[in-house]
Amino acid sequence: MTADLYCVMGNPVEHSRSPWIHARFAQLTGQDVHYGKRLVPLGGFQQAVRDFRAEGGRGCNVTVPFKFEAAPLATQLTARAALAGACNTLRFDGAGILADNTDGVGLANDIAHNAGIDIGGRDVLLIGAGGAASGVLGPLLEARPRRIVVANRTCAKAGLLAERHGALAARNGVRLEAPELRDLRDAFDVVINATTTSLSGAAVPVPAAVLKPGALACDMMYGPAAQGFLAWASRHGAVARDGLGMLVEQAAEAFFVWRGVRPPSAQVLAELRTTLQ
Ligand code: ATR
């Protein structure tokens, strides 16, 4: 019997850790899966998906810059992907394609299970209103914090993001706000950086006073790209957390979508940290 084929499609994709993570998930759960990576030319995403299906692929992850191009291919779009406006997971179901987004659940599960913080009833600050922020807001609301404030350099974008999630916030009893940065005065239990400021070496666009003493401060990136934010958070008394756990947890959720089996993600995260040291 040959293994079921999966891959990650992106550009660039060379440094993706997903093949390693999914290979470990497959080993540890006894699933017969092969997971590769495909460098997809810009403008070539839809063709790449068609080609992979024709080769017998069962599904794929989608990463930068194609996350916004996946939904039009879907015959079924999950509610969380529709709300996020982006997809990172496709599952090929016979004639159809399920498009999903596991990023937000990945972040929420990393905070809950790996960092050990229950955000229920807490105050959360989400910095940024681009694709990364949009991918995680829904699952953060579903964890039922007391309040989520979305803060972005361009306030209007934060306003639109909050508006789109208004009904979900109300259903979960969460206060959802998007104030101007200059009006941001409170301190938060959990602060999540979903901007690209660390990447570009730009300053974190909120004052350090947003961090309660001992707050959890997460960047959605890992490795050198996260260092600016993590150093800022540690310097100001927060517990700094990079995005490696989110990476493993979004992969675990994708693995579950494909295989119906939950892999031991905490173990794989610990192993991945060791290999990266
Ligand atoms: P991604 O898909 O990774 O979220 P994006 O959609 O380009 O990328 O969003 C980048 C985010 O980082 C945005 O929230 C952006 O703020 P604006 O909406 O005001 O552009 C934020 N960002 C990028 N550079 C920034 C900087 N120098 N200062 C503050 N915010 C910045």
Image: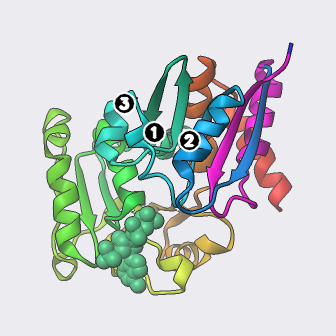
Q: Is residue 171 left or right of residue 192?
A: left
x and y percent of residue 74 in the render?
41, 33
Q: Secondary structure at mark 2?
A: helix
Magenta-highlighted residues: 2-31
Q: What residue does disc 2 label? A: 250
User: Are the two marked residues, 2 and 1, in contact with CB atoms closer than 8 angstroms?
Assistant: yes
Q: Can residue 28 be seen in this snapshot?
A: yes
x and y percent of residue 167 in the render?
13, 39
Q: What residue does disc 1 label? A: 105
Q: Secondary structure at mark 3?
A: loop
Q: Quadrant of ligand 1?
A: bottom left
Image color mode: rainbow
Q: Can residue 194 be seen in this snapshot?
A: no
Q: Residue at x 39, y 41 (%)?
A: 71
Quadrant assignment, res 207: bottom left
Q: Secondary structure at mark 1?
A: helix
Q: Disc 3 or 1, which lies upstream in sequence?
A: 3
Q: Disc 2 or 1, which lies upstream in sequence?
A: 1
Which amino acid, mark 1?
Answer: Val
Mark 3 surroundings within 10 Å by alpha-carbon count, few (fewer than 14), some (14 through 19), many (20 or more): some
Picture quarter with the C terminus? bottom right
Q: Disc 2 or 3, which lies upstream in sequence?
A: 3
Q: What residue does disc 3 label? A: 78
Q: Is mark 3 within 8 Å of ligand 1?
A: no
Q: CA distance from mark 2 to mark 3?
A: 15 Å
User: Are the two marked residues, 3 and 1, in contact with CB atoms closer than 8 angstroms?
Assistant: no
Q: Nearer the viewer, residue 186 or 142?
A: 142
Picture quarter with the N terminus? top right
Which amino acid, mark 3?
Answer: Thr
Q: CA distance from mark 3 to mark 1?
A: 13 Å
Q: Is residue 154 left or right of residue 264?
A: left
